[in-house]
Image: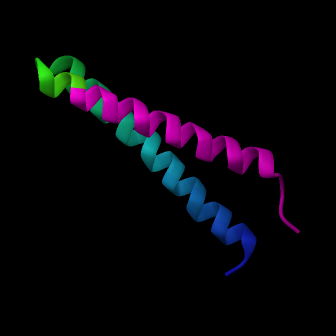
């Protein structure tokens, strides 16, 4: 597997984390209450940070040869 393909799959994971964080934030703000809302929001923000770091890594790594 080439480096370019590996970067593509890593970026897909980052995009998936960002989409999952959006869904979890909407769920925690509109559908859940109490402790479940807080736990879901914490997971959502962790996924958002991880997704952002992954995308930042892919963008800053630059083009492959």
Number of numbered tags placed on the structure image: 0
Residue 27 position within the rendered picture, expressed as x and y whole percent measured from the top left: 21, 28
Residue drawn 50% across the image and 55% down it: 13
Outermost bottom residue: 1
Q: Which quarter shows the C terminus?
A: bottom right
Is 40 placed above or below 10 here?
A: above
Q: Quadrant of residue 26?
A: top left
Give the image's coloring scheme.
rainbow
Identity of the residue drawn at 46% across and 39% down = 18
**Can residue 32 be seen in this snapshot?**
no
Q: Residue at x 66, y 70 (%)?
A: 5
Whether residue 56 can be seen here: yes
Magenta residues, as a range? 39-65
* 63 shown above or below 40: below
User: Residue placed at 23% from the left, 22% from the top?
Assistant: 38
Quarter holding the N terminus? bottom right
Q: Position of residue 12 (x, y in %)?
A: 53, 56
Q: Which of these two is toward me, 41 or 14?
A: 41
The answer to whether 25 appears left or right of 5 in the picture is: left
- Where residue 36 appears, as percent x and y from the top left, is 14, 28
- The x and y percentages for residue 44 are 35, 33
48 in the magenta segment:
yes
Name the side, left or right, on which 23 lies relative to 50.
left
Left or right: where 48 falls relative to 38: right
Residue 20 colored in magenta in the image: no
Q: Main secondary structure of the magenta part?
A: helix
């Amino acid at each position: 597997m080439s480096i370019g393909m590996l970067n593509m799959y890593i970026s897909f994971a980052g995009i998936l984390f960002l989409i999952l964080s959006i869904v979890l934030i909407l769920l925690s703000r509109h559908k859940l209450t109490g402790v479940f809302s807080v736990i879901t929001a914490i997971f959502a923000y962790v996924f958002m940070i991880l997704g952002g770091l992954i995308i930042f890594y892919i963008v800053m790594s630059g083009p492959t040869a």
